[in-house]
Image (cartoon, rainbow, N blue to C red):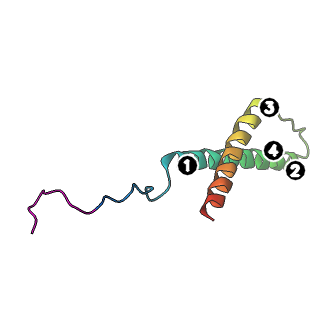
Amino acid sequence: MSREGAPSKQPKPERERPAGTAIWVWVIYAFGILGAAIMLFSGLFTLGAALLARDVPVSYDFSVPATILWGGLLLAAVVTWVIRRRQRR
């Protein structure tokens, strides 16, 4: 018989990995989805303007820093997903 609060004689289990996905992974995924959405909708908007504006010349500005930023966030999300997927196997 043991008293309440008495130390257990059983060995403590080793610390297990926490269940679920870490918050930093969800943050990277969210920024990657945002980057993908911005790039996709920007491309579709520009394509739609170019195809539908027959009587007005269409011009657009291509921002290299924005492309690097959103493309980098998208790439980070894809790389994170691939690495985590390979670790599960």
Q: Magenta residues, as a range?
A: 1-10
Indicate the amino acid at tag 3: Val
Residue linked to disc 1: 25
Q: Which residue is mark 4?
A: 46
- Residue at the disc numbered 3: 64
First of labels 2, 3 by sequence position: 2
Relative height, residue 54 to residue 16 (above, below): above
* Residue 23 position (above or below residue 3): above
- Tell me how far mark 2 sits from mark 1, CA to CA: 39 Å
Marks 2 and 1, the one that precedes in the sequence: 1
- In the figure, is residue 14 to the left or right of 63? left
Residue type at mark 2: give it: Leu
Question: Which residue shows up at 64% across the image and 47% down it?
Answer: 32
Q: Are marks 3 and 1 in contact (CB under 8 Å)?
A: no
Q: Nearer the viewer, mark 4 or mark 3?
A: 3
**In the image, what residue type sits under mark 1?**
Val
Query: Which residue in the structure is indicated by mark 2?
Result: 51
Left or right: where 80 falls relative to 23: right
Upstream in the sequence, badge 1 or badge 4? 1
Residue 8 belongs to magenta span: yes
Please provide percent x and percent y for residue 18.
Answer: 43, 55
Q: Nearer the viewer, residue 33 or 27?
A: 27
Residue 64 picture location, percent across and down: 80, 31
Residue 79 rendering spot, x and y as whole percentages: 69, 49
- For the residues labelled 2 and 3, the Cα–Cα distance comes to 23 Å
